[in-house]
Image (cartoon, rainbow, N blue to C red):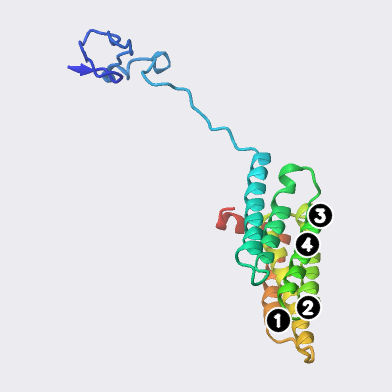
Amino acid sequence: MSYCVQCGVKLEQSLKSCPLCHTPVINPNELNSTDLSDVIGPFSTIKGEVEPMKKHDIGLWLTLVFGSTAIACAILNLFVFDHNYWSIPVIGACIVLWIFFCPRMFLPKISIYLNLLVTAISVIFYEFAITFMTKSDRWFFEIILPTTLVIMVLVTISGFFYKVVSSSLIASALYLFVDVGFLSVALECYIDRFMGSEVHLFWSAIVFSVCAVISIALSAILSIKRLRETVRKRLHF
C-alpha cells in the first residue's frame, strides 16, 4: 500500500493521482522506462532566488549604524560621562568609516583616487582631534601626520599600478610588500627624529630587506610567463 506524499492518504495501485489533493502518483519502478521530462512531480521545480541587497540600501544601513553610534556617544559624553572628551575617538572613527565605505555605495562612479584623498583627509582630522585629549600635539605633527601622508602616497601609487598595470593576486602581493618596506623605513626615521636621536635604520632595515627579497621574487614570477603559469596552477588561483 502506498501513500500520497502530499496529504498522506492511502492510495490504490491503480490510481494515477491522489483522490483528495490530486497530487500525481509516480511509481519509482517505472521511472527508468518513463521520459522524465514528461513527468510532473508533486513538488515545484521552480527555483526561488532571494533578491540581492542593493549597495544603496547597505549604504543607508551603515549610515544609520555609524550615525546612531556617534550621536549616542556624544549625548553620553555631554550629559552622563562628562569628565573628559572620550567620545571624540568614537565619533571620529564613525566618520572615517562612513567616508571609507559609504560614498562608493551612493556614488558608484566616483573616482577611487578621490575617495582615497577624502578618506586620508578624514583620517588626518580624526588623528588631530585626538590631540585634544593629550597634553601635546607634537606626536601628531612629527609622527602621525607625515606617516599618514606617506601611506596615502603609497596606497595611491599602488592603486594606480593595480588599475593600469596588473590586478592579479601576485601583483597585489608585490604592491603590498613594496609599500610595507618603504613605510617601515619612513616610520623609523620619523620616530628617531621625534625622540631627538640621530636617524639610524635598525629594525626597518631588516623589514625593508625582507620585503625587497620577496618583491624581487614576485617580480620575477610576473615577468616570466612559464613561471607565472606554473605558480598559478600550483596555488590554484
Q: CA distance from mark 2 to mark 3?
A: 29 Å
Tell me which label, 4 or 3, sits earlier in the chain: 3
Whether residue 227 appears in this view of the structure is no
Horizontally, is 128 left or right of 50 in the view?
right
Residue, disc 4 = 120
Tell me which label, 4 or 2, sits earlier in the chain: 4
Mark 1 touching mark 2, by CB under 8 A? Answer: no
Tell me which label, 1 or 2, sits earlier in the chain: 2
Q: In the image, which is nearer the foreground, mark 3 or mark 1? A: 3
Q: Quadrant of residue 227?
A: bottom right
Whether residue 175 appears in this view of the structure is yes
Question: Which amino acid type is marked by label 1?
Answer: Ser
Residue 24 vertical position relative to residue 172 in the rendered view, above or below: above
Question: Which amino acid type is marked by label 4?
Answer: Ala
Residue located 56% across and 57% down the image: 235
Residue, disc 3 = 113
Which one is in front, 63 or 8?
Answer: 63
Label 3, secondary structure: give it.
Answer: helix
